[in-house]
Every structure is written in structure tokens, then in C-alpha cells.
Amino acid sequence: SAVVTTSFTIGEATVIATPTITIAGSAANGTTHTGDKTVSFASTTAGVTFYYTTNGTTPTISSSSGNSFTTSGSATVKVLAVKANYTNSAVASATYTITVPTPSFSAGTGLYTGDQSITLSDSLAGVTILYKIGSGTYNTYTGAFNTAGSATYTAYATKSGYADSAMIAVTYTIKLAAPTLSYASATVANDFNLTMSAPAGSTIRYTTNGTTPDSNSNIYSGAITVSGTQT
């Protein structure tokens, strides 16, 4: 006999539960986080496939798929859940802000003898770090720099697609290194010339009678002839 084909639709297909979106284990929408985090999807309907976008557009089955992804800056993520013989879920949406981690200085606030070589770093790759000295203008950090006396340094980091980091400030108090003498304490047979050296740009003041030099003491300008017993 001839073949008879027919089909039946019993009721309506079950609608997949709307996905939930979490970031670092908590609801994602409207949250702010420091550094990139993991975004995860879940649905009370088992066995679904999640399709998502991170630019605010509506996802389709041609969009990226998976149960989670790592952020790469602030975004609006939308996710759709799909399963064979089920009606697709409603699209869930969440907007979150990712902030650049605060940069760090290689030396913290403190008292240092002599100028220091300072480096800046950040735990997030690809950032631009900007810093300033005192109330000056911000400079782009390109590599290690030397302090030039006591000052407060302020820095923050920025990256496209991320919120700027928090500010960090450190204060360096720089104490000049002690002058270097060409001779140490010693007993010598003859008179001799004593020379002194100190960091560039500094002024050396000295005494020859054992008293502590101050701002009124002799200014060193060249070799001193030492004769007899002197301190």
C-alpha cells in the first residue's frame, strides 16, 4: 500500500530557564572588580549550550560558546541558552566594570641614603603607567628613573577598555651620602694633600679641629694640605 506520513506536536516545547551570569562567583551585573576575572553562566535547565557576546549585541548560535570566559576589560555580556527540542531561553544581560590594578613602586615611603633607582610595575599586562613628582605634571613611565632629592611621587595605571587604577603615592626622604676622604685616619710621616668627594651637585663643609661641621663651616673647593695632627 502507499506510505502515509504524519506528525504530531504535543503541547509546546519547554522553554529553557534564563541563564544567570556571575563574575568571580557573585552576580555580575553592576559590579566593579580590580583585574580581570572569570565570568560564568548557569541555567536550571540541564544540558544546555550557552552562546554569548561581550559587546552588548544579542547572541545567536553563531556567537562564542562556553560555560565561562576570562574578562578583558569592562563589558556588557549577553548570553543565550540553547538545547535541542527546547525553546531557546530569554537573553540574560550583565554589565560590569574592570579596573586596572594599582601600580607599585620598587621602594616604599621611607628615608634613604643617596638617590634611589625607582621602577614601577603593574600586575596587568599592557598598561600605561603615569607618574608625577610633587605637584608637577604626569609623565609616562618608560623605565627606571633616579630620584633627585626628597619628594612625593604619585602614580596610576590606565588601559583601553578598563577603568583607571587607584592612585598610589610614596614619599622619599633622601639623605646625602657621607663625603669620601682620600685618606682614612692614620699616622703618616709627612704632610699630605687630602681630597674629598661627594654626590654631584652637593657642597662639602669641613672642619680641621675635631668639631662637627655645620652650615657656617669651611666649604671644600679643592685638596687640603694636612700638616701636623688634625681631625
Image: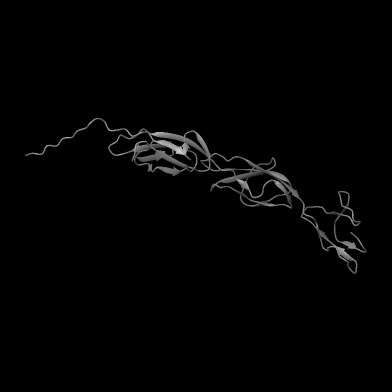
User: Residue drawn at (73%, 50%), measured in percent from left and top?
Assistant: 112
Find the residue positioned furthest to the right: 228
Which residue is found at the position 70% from the left and 52% from the top? 116
Q: Quadrant of the C terminus?
A: bottom right
Q: Where the N terminus falls, by quadrant?
A: top left
Whether residue 168 is visible here, answered yes or no, is yes
Picture coordinates of residue 89 (x, y %)? 35, 34
Instruction: Give the residue at x 43% y 44%.
Output: 69
154 left or right, relative to 174: left
Q: Is residue 206 left or right of residue 173?
A: right
Q: Nearer the viewer, residue 145 or 173?
A: 173
Q: Going by the image, does 48 lie left or right of 135?
A: left
Residue 90: x percent and y percent?
36, 32
Residue farthest bottom in this picture: 189
Compared to residue 96, the image places residue 108 above or below, namely: below
Tell me where residue 5 appears, x and y as whole percent.
Answer: 14, 37
Q: Nearer the viewer, residue 19 or 169?
A: 19
The figure's colour scheme reads one colour
Where, by quadrant of the figure, is residue 187 drawn?
bottom right
